[in-house]
Image (spheres, rainbow, N blue to C red):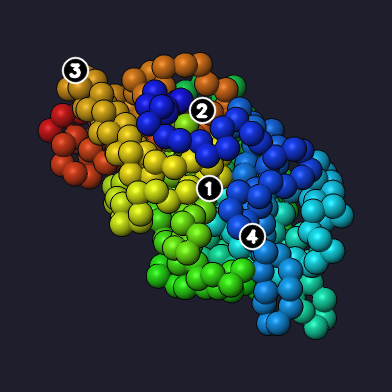
Amino acid sequence: MANPQEHELTYVLGDTLPAAGHTLEIAPGVRWLRMGLPFALDHINLWLVRDELDGRQGWTIVDCGIANDATRAAWERIFAEDLDGLPVLRVLVTHMHPDHIGLAHWLTTRWSTPEWPCRLWISLSDWNAARMASISTTGFGGEAAAAFFGSHGVTDPAALDKVRQRGNYYASMVPAVPQQFRRMMEGQRLTMGGHVWTCHAGFGHAPEHISLHCEALGVLISGDMVLPRISTNISVIDIEPEADPLPLYLASIERMRRLPADTLILPAHGKPFRGLHPRIQQLQDHHTDRLADVMAACAVRPHSAFEILPVLFRRELDLHQLTFAMGEAIAHLHALWLDGDLKRVRQADGVWRFGVV
């Protein structure tokens, strides 16, 4: 949902956006670009950092966009017009979701030579998850996902059939993942553009999401962990059906309070902004309120995740949004269940419902 307290944030460039197929400098040596997405969330922000690696001048890409012809064409235009004749040296990916890693294989192949490989940098957990998802239906569609959603109350045969047909959902946007990578992990310090950037691992949204903070520039590339207008999706999926991701996410963003209050946030969606500390509080308050709403509903009668959707999402959802919303509804129910506030019972219809203890 849109952020009702957005006025507490400061958009440093106002409503200015990079032109399609071009970049816009947002900090010294850091350029902002946007690629389209075929969803209600219709864009992703990507970043180019002027860099030097092994004595070679060039650029580091942070996040990639999905694998489709339009995104590849936009990248080719940027390569031709915005790189100052210099090569891409490496590709950093914050996490394994398709809009972030989709073109990593193409980009690293496009810029590798026998002497100078263009390497993917990513966390170990997300590299493994991306490799698995690109060759399976894991967590994003197919029979297992349909059965999982069915066990949480989705009974509409047409909706479940559409989920089954999405078995190729991830691979359609991430057809391949580089077979080699360089690992990023919590606390690691890497040099980009002559500045030290520190890796901050976050959990709950992806297996091991890496945000990148540069103290010298006062910049945080936050990926999906902190977004200005919408809340980060926190989902339970079929491969870890009893997961409890919401406390992991809230603890992760709480650790970001250690960063300076005036840090410039470069988010994956929305516009660059200042106001990290207020935004963290807004996100924590949002989830506290949603947990209270869920608890109140379940105190009246036990609810399945599907039955709790109107409590959490007061708008009509398309299929893409429904799968994310179901994952998030289960995450809120699990947070209360695994904390001992709700009990979980599988009822005669085969659906899990959650009621007060």
Badge 2 or badge 4: first in the primary sequence: 4
Extreme-left residue of the structure: 357
Which element carries disc 3, helix, strand or loop? helix
Any part of residue 130 in sight: no
Query: Where residue 63 sits: x, y (%)?
Result: 63, 54
Label 1 or label 3, whichever comes before in sequence order? 1
Task: For label 4, count other residues whose C-alpha is less than 10 Å away and answer few (under 14), some (14-19) or many (20+).
Answer: some
Residue 79 visible within the image: yes
Q: Residues within 10 Å of mark 2 (few under 14, many from 20)?
A: some
**Label 1 to label 3, Cα distance in Å?**
42 Å
Residue highlighted by disc 3: 300
x then y, percent, for residue 299: 17, 22
Q: In percent of the image, x 38 and y 18: which residue is there?
A: 310
Query: In this figure, which residue is indicated by the disc labeled 4?
Result: 29
The first of marks 4 and 3 along the sequence is 4
Q: Select label 2 or label 4 by which is in front.
A: 4
Nearer to us of marks 1 and 3 is 1
Query: Which three-letter amino acid code belongs to the residue tagged 3?
Result: Val
Q: Position of residue 148 (x, y in %)?
A: 45, 38
Q: Amino acid at mark 2?
A: Leu
Say which quadrant the C terminus sits in.
top left
Residue 139 vs 125, above or below: the answer is: above
For residue 87, side relative to residue 342 (left or right): right
Disc 1 vs disc 2: which is toward the camera? Answer: 1
The residue that label 1 is drawn on is: 266
Q: Which mark is residue 34?
A: none
Residue at 52%, 21% in the rendered image = 317
Q: Position of residue 229 (x, y in %)?
A: 47, 31
Q: Nearer the viewer, residue 249 or 145?
A: 249
Closer to the chain start, of discs 2 and 3, is 3
Location of the N terminus by quadrant is top left
In front of the other: 2 or 132: 2
